[in-house]
Structures are given as C-alpha cells and as structure tokens.
Amino acid sequence: LILFHVWSILLNMWLPYVSPVVPDWCYQSQHTCATPCNGPEKWYHANKDCEGRAQSPINIVHRKTLTDERLTPFQFRKYQDSFSGLIKNNGHSVQVNVPHQPYVIGGDLEKPYKVVQFHLHWGKNGGPGSEHTIDGEQYPMELHIVHMNEEHSTLEDALKDPIGVAVLGFFYEESLSANRKYDPVVRALQRIMMTGANTTLVSVSLEQLIPPQQNLSNYYRYKGSLTTPGCTESVIWTVFEKPIPLSRDQLRVFSDLQFKDGKPMVGTFRPVQPLNGRVVYRSGGAVVVASTAILLASVTMAMGLSQPD
C-alpha cells in the first residue's frame, strides 16, 4: 500500500499538468463561474492584437468630432441587386455571405471596396446591444457590412493591409410597426437557432436592409479594428447616423438564437474601447444642411423686413 502511494505521487510529478479547456473567447454575457471563458477583458489571451491602441468599437462624442469635407456621400453599386446567400449561426453572431460582391465608392475611400459579408451585434430582447455608441447612447442592434479593398482576393489578405478593410456600421431603432423588408431575414433566423446551423437567405438585396441612400450623407469616420478576435487594426470604420427601424418583435427574434452551450445568444457586443488619441471625423452633410437652413431663414427674414408696409 505504501509503495502504491509513492508510485502515485511520482506518477503525478512526471505527468504534464493539463489545464481546464477554456474557449478561445466569449462575450461577457456568456461568462459565468460554471462556464469560464475569456471574456472581452481577456481577449488578448485569444489574440494579442486585442490589446492594441486602435481598437473598436468606440463611443463617438459628437462635439469632439471634426468635420471633414472630403467625406462625401457614398455611391452604392450593385446594392440593389437581389441575391441568395448562406446565412449561418456561427456561435457568436449571424453572418451572411454575399456572393455577387456589390461595392462602394466615394466617402473618401481611395479605391472601390467590395462586400464580403455582413453580420450583426445585439443585446437582449431588444435592449441595448449596439457596439458603437453615440454620446454614450447604445442602440438595440448594429449591422456591420464588411468590405475589402478591390486589390485583394480574400479577406485574410485584406486584413494584412492597414487600409484593406472598410466596414459600414448601421444602428437599429425600435419602431411601432414591423419593417417588412426584413421578413426574409427574420424567417431565416427561425431556421438557424442552434450554433452551426445554416440556411439560404433567398432573394434579398443589401439596399433593402439599409436606409435609403439619400438619408446616408451623415456619418462618422475613424481608423479602428475588427470588434472580435483577432481584433486586427486594419479597418476603416464608417458609422452612419440614420438608424434602421425594426419592431420589438423583430428585434427579439435575434435573442432566440443559441450559443454553442444552448443558452440564448444575447449581449453579442464588445464594450467600447479607448480612443488613445485617435480623431473621429464626421461628414459635412449635417453642417451643410444646418447652414442652408440658417441661410434660407436669414434670406426670408430679410425679404420680410424689406417689404413695404
């Protein structure tokens, strides 16, 4: 018996220590004592770039942004074309691959940037869930349309280029009525509740998922990163002011999806990151509109004053 105990001790000394298996990364909503994982504050364990100095998302403080007249309205090419693409519950979000590669030009982008995929980030049952915030306000959900510079053939290659990726971010707001343009997405979500499930999103266009183009002249611009590991700092961010309306029921459908462990997929957003000296720019749209309104009011007043009694 004594020899057995000695042998057990020696065996334990010789065997390598095996640490508990911990997922590479997770959202804060997934982290519990029973299910430990590397939450956002420890994402650097999954990839060291996650503790870089140009990380996303950020809180955009409007009064601290600088107007840049080079930030002209975008031109959305092939956004109106319908397509059928794979929509998948990837365990962290819902992602849709866009096969026919619409693209954008303008917006002070040096070259055309073609669409690769889009995905979303949300809260719980329509509660706060956007990644970016405006003056501290968090919207219920945020859409990211991921583009890569036309010079690259894969997203992996584009991420090696400091200006290889451009992401267009759109907020959502709760509306009283349902947004029927989102019916194909909502129907597809009901078929991909479990992690790894996928289906075909049929006959949808990017144009129907975002606000009308004439409402997209006001936006913010800064240099940042992917908002999930590897957190690569190769992203030109554009965050639009005009939100997309969805009803409460439509927003809640996203919370019916499941993480890998079967728990509700909620709180799928990274907390805002420090600016670390970065400057956030805004397009001249809002300033131009305001200036025009003031000018018209001044002219009207002057004409009124000049009229004879």
Image: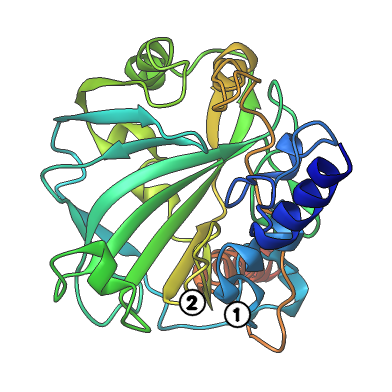
x then y, percent, for residue 15? 65, 57
Question: For residue 264, what is the image quadrant?
Answer: top right
SS for dot 1: loop
- What mark, if any, has residue 54 been given in the picture? 1
Q: Is residue 64 visible?
A: yes
- Tell which of 195 and 24 is nearer to you: 24
Is residue 153 depicted above or below 183 in this figure?
below
* Label 2 SS: loop
- Say if mark 1 contacts mark 2, CB within 8 Å: yes
Q: Is 45 in front, or is 67?
A: 45
| 146 sits to left or right of 267 | left
Which residue is at the front of the view, 208 or 257?
257
Marks 1/2: CA distance?
Answer: 6 Å
User: Is there any visible trace of residue 308 in the rendered image?
Assistant: no
Q: Quadrant of residue 2?
A: top right
- Within 10 Å of disc 1 (Cα), the crowding (few <14, some 14-19, many 20+) is many
Q: Residues within 10 Å of mark 2 (few under 14, many from 20)?
A: many
Q: Tell me if 182 is positioned left or right of 203 in this view.
A: right
View extreme (right): residue: 2
Q: Looking at the picture, which amino acid does disc 2 mark?
A: Glu
**Residue type (three-letter) at the residue carrying disc 1:** Ala
Q: Label 2: which residue?
A: 233
Residue in view at x 20 percent, y 78 percent: 111
For the C terminus, which image quadrant? bottom right
User: Residue 54, percent across and down?
Assistant: 60, 80
Which residue is more in the foreground, 87 or 25? 25
Q: Position of residue 48 (x, y in %)?
A: 59, 75
Q: Earlier in the sequence, mark 1 or mark 2?
A: 1
Q: Which numbered circle lies on residue 161?
A: none
Q: Quadrant of the N terminus?
A: top right
Task: Specify the quadrant of the image occupied by residue 293.
Answer: bottom right
Residue plotted at (65% across, 52% down)? 18
